[in-house]
Amino acid sequence: MLMIAKIDEILREAMVVIGKVSSRADLEAAKAKFLSPSGSLRELIKGVALLSKEEKPAVGQAINVCKSEIDAMLAAKLVEIESAEAESLLGEAPDPTLSKAGSGGTFCHPLTQIKNRIVEILGKLGFSVADGSEIETEWFCFDALNTPQSHPSRSESDTFYFDTAVAVENVAKSDSERYILRAHTSTVQIRTMLQQKPPIKILSPGTVFRRDAIDATHSPSFHQCEGLVVEEGTNVCDLKATLAFLFEELIGKGCEMRMRPSFFPFVSPGFEVDFRSENLGKLSNRWIEICGCGMVAPSVFKNCGYGDDAAGFAFGVGIERLAMLLYGVDDIRLFFKNDARFLRQFATPML
Ligand code: DAH
């Protein structure tokens, strides 16, 4: 049968051609030669229509077998090429002095830029950066912050818990203490108060974790910046002036701010802060909720071993939330996708 012989011939030719392939370009060319609409196998398929009813099944089957063998040879070749590429990358000693081809220079991620701005602005008021830990215990994340066992944020559906039970050094706590991924940066208030003596003036930017499903405004990990001041005589006016300075420097002159009473277990009184500005595109001239704050609650001071005369304030801002508002970004996922086309829009020299 002429057709079957032709199919055999194509298969033999494909073995030779694909056998010699050594690059992605060769692979594409080989694929086109045999499988593209004008390739030799496709040409043959067109001829099947002219065959008799009896001949068609055998020829059809032979064509299918031939196509799947060519597909398999191409796939095997691709694996070979990919592993050769990976090996050659491994073999090259990295040159740290080179910037990545096409990267357009080095610049900070937009979230890092916002974080750096906050640290820079509040640095002018004497705040320094304090470090915390992303893996925490329930005591640091909740109990020490006066958050009762029944608080919804402590549920397994809100917070990530490890199975391991732990003993926390020098700290009274319940038997069921477990490791968790911190749900907020307020934990650093406690760590700092246990380590330092007043006056304290710290910022703690960092990653936090919550069991939220991912959508345009939620992510199971995001970033906050906590602020804490502990100093005798500190009052709500100091808190308000600090935040007003932060937002005016961040957003620009003419930015207004207001504080509404609100509840957070670790502050008393507690407030929710809104700002309003005419420089915020679509969101201009509207009150926008931006951070929680308040005067550190007496029970929190007590948990850290401080006396009744201790006074101070704390606040916490969401870095993604600020970045979305300031840059007009409407989907939080864009910050984590690492698409260079998105990130490059925020390219400014590293601070
Ligand atoms: N930890 C709070 C949260 O994640 C934010 C917050 C509210 C921080 C009030 C504070 C504060 O320091 O005083 O939602």
Image (cartoon, rainbow, N blue to C red):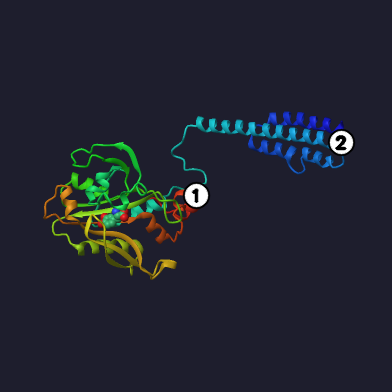
Out of 350 and 144, give the one closest to the viewer: 144
* Above or below 178: residue 278: below
Out of 161 and 308, give the one closest to the viewer: 161
Q: Which residue is drawn at 47% across and 32% down?
A: 93
Q: Residue at x 76, y 31 (%)?
A: 11
Q: Is residue 18 left or right of residue 190?
A: right
* Above or below 88: residue 284: below
What x and y, as percent, mark residue 184?
31, 50
Question: What residue type is disc 2 on?
Answer: Glu
Q: Which element type, helix, strand or loop, lies under badge 2? A: loop
Q: Is residue 52 left or right of residue 286?
A: right
Q: Quadrant of residue 54?
A: top right
Q: Which residue is drawn at 19% across and 48% down?
A: 193
Q: Which residue in the protein does label 1 denote?
A: 340
What x and y, as percent, mark residue 35?
73, 39
Out of 251 and 8, give the one closest to the viewer: 8
Residue 225 can be seen in this image = no
Question: What residue type is disc 1 on?
Answer: Ala
Q: Which residue in the protein does label 2 denote?
A: 54
Labelled pair 2, 1 in contact (Cβ < 8 Å): no
Q: How far apart are marks 2 and 1 (CA)?
A: 58 Å
**Residue mark closest to the camera, 2 vs 1:** 2
Which quadrant of the render holds ligand 1? bottom left
Q: Earlier in the sequence, mark 2 or mark 1?
A: 2
Quadrant location of the N terminus in the rendered image: top right
- Pointer 2: residues within 10 angstroms few (<14), some, or many (20+)? few
Q: Which element type, helix, strand or loop, lies under badge 1? A: helix
What x and y, as percent, mark residue 199?
16, 52
